Amino acid sequence: MKRMSVAVLAVTLLTGVAVAQELIINGDFEQGLEVGWTEEVRPLAGTWLFERSDTCGQPQPGFIARVRKDLGTSAALVQTVVVPSVNLTFSYTGRFRIGGGSSTCWPAAALILRYLDSANVELGNSKCVLHNEYCSWANSDTAHIIEIELPEVWAGHNLDIAREITDNLPGVNASQVTKIRVELFAYDNGT
């Protein structure tokens, strides 16, 4: 059985103004997952799990959200946030895990930021991802893969959204980004 999951302790999207404003609802998961987050499943086979629990061994107190998908296709915990501009800092603490896989059935655990325009059309994305050697996702002018280097280890990450778009997504017009869709994403491309 192929198993993949992504666990995230806390996610924040802060504005770049002098007084920071938190844009993500329930990014610390102190409330139930139904507050601010939506569960999305694209099942081909296997099971999935959305879970809010204590920190699963992470040294900071509080709660985490965990998404797991076994076998075909994906499960994601998502939230779309209206943003004033791309002058934002996205931060999260997470632990990524995948298991199994082959050239015809490869898993990935990811935290995906999808940059949307006012009509909810995706302009591009950044994927913080743990995957095996068979993953077919690749960088392009509208997609940037950020490799997770420490699987199964809790680690903090920060992303300057304006710099990410300027440096890694030349096909994305930053002035058209009005929303960011945050996805805690578990995936398997086969059965």
Image: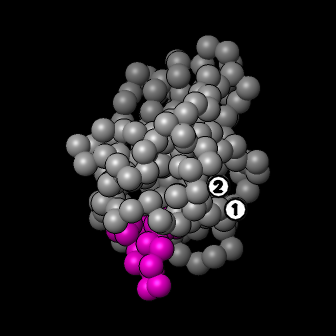
Q: Is residue 160 magenta?
A: no
Mark 2 belongs to which amino acid? Answer: Arg
Q: Is there any visible trace of residue 93 in the rendered image?
A: yes
- Tell me the residue that label 2 is attached to: 95
Residue at the far top in the pictured view: 104
Residue visible at 63% across and 76% down in the picture? 60
Foreground residue, 62 or 94? Answer: 94
Callout 1 touching callout 2 (CB < 8 Å) = yes
**Is 9 on the left-hand or right-hand side of 155?**
left
**Is 37 on the left-hand or right-hand side of 64?**
left
- Tell me the residue that label 1 is attached to: 155
- Could you classify mark 2 by the number of other residues whose Cα lies within 10 Å: few (under 14), some (14-19), or many (20 or more)? many
Give the magenta range.
9-28
Residue 87 image point, x, y percent: 47, 65
The residue tagged with tag 2: helix, strand or loop? strand
**Is 79 on the left-hand or right-hand side of 113?**
left
Foreground residue, 19 or 100? Answer: 19
Residue visible at 40% across and 39% down in the picture? 123
Mark 1 belongs to which amino acid? Answer: Ala
Residue 164 image point, x, y percent: 58, 52
